[in-house]
Image (tube, rainbow, N blue to C red):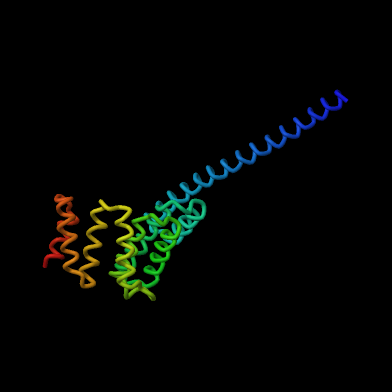
Amino acid sequence: VFAINIGSFTVGKKIVDIKTWHKRLAISLVILIILFSFVFAQISYRAGKSMLSEGKVEQASTLFKLARELSPAEVDNYLIEAAFWKNRAFEENNHEAAVRADELYEQLMFQNIYDADSRLHRAILHRDGFSLLSNPASKEVMIDWLEQALRWRPHHNILQSEYLRTLKRYGRVNEARVFLAKYLKMYPKSNSLANVREEIMN
């Protein structure tokens, strides 16, 4: 009986060792997959930037898309391409470019709910390029995007400036002036606030 118990214990120990080894292997594979995904996402992102600088727009877009699929929470995988389409939309009065930029900002807002840049640039796109969009956001929604972004990045002078411009655009001039005085007191040497001051006070 004693020998049988010893044998059972040995077999049981081997089973436990095998299960532990399988678990460690699975964990190692998961870590490797995550690391490789991150590396390939970075390679795709850098290649996309290079293609974009060479004017190979569709190839760059494909690479940025791959980078987003591999690393969906990385903000630069959205912002670089979105900025390109936003600039083209404004320069060429281009509806398709505006839509593509808006889609990328929307995706980033969904993937990273605390990202301020996507809200900032999407608000600018809808405010200044509303005629290029099929369904532009309301003024209330745009202001809400900017206020959300300011809660996360309260010291961002460009964000503050665009918030003031948006308030003025939609008739809230007195409120914009109150915030301007507050921001200038905190950041008297800010160039972006100095520039927007001329717009708000005139």
Please state if 13 lies on the left or on the right of 34 as rendered.
right
For the view shown, which residue lies furthest in the left direction? 202
- Report x, y in % for residue 157: 23, 54
Residue extending farthest front: 1
From the viewer's perspective, tell me whether residue 105 is left or right of residue 174: right
Tally of marks: 0
Q: Residue at x 38, y 60 (%)?
A: 82
Asked whether 197 or 148 is in front, the reply is: 148
Where on the picture, by quarter, is residue 57?
A: bottom left
Is 137 rendered above or below residue 164?
below
Residue 20 picture location, percent across and down: 68, 35
Q: Nearer the viewer, residue 44 or 178?
A: 178
The N terminus, quarter of image: top right
Q: What is the x, y in percent for residue 150? A: 29, 56
Residue 39 image offset from top left, x and y in percent? 49, 44
> Is 127 rendered above or below residue 73?
below
- Quarter of the C terminus within the rendering: bottom left
Image-quadrant location for residue 27: top right
Task: Tell me the quarter of the picture where residue 64 sits.
Answer: bottom left
Kindly give the residue lying farthest to the right in the view shown: 1
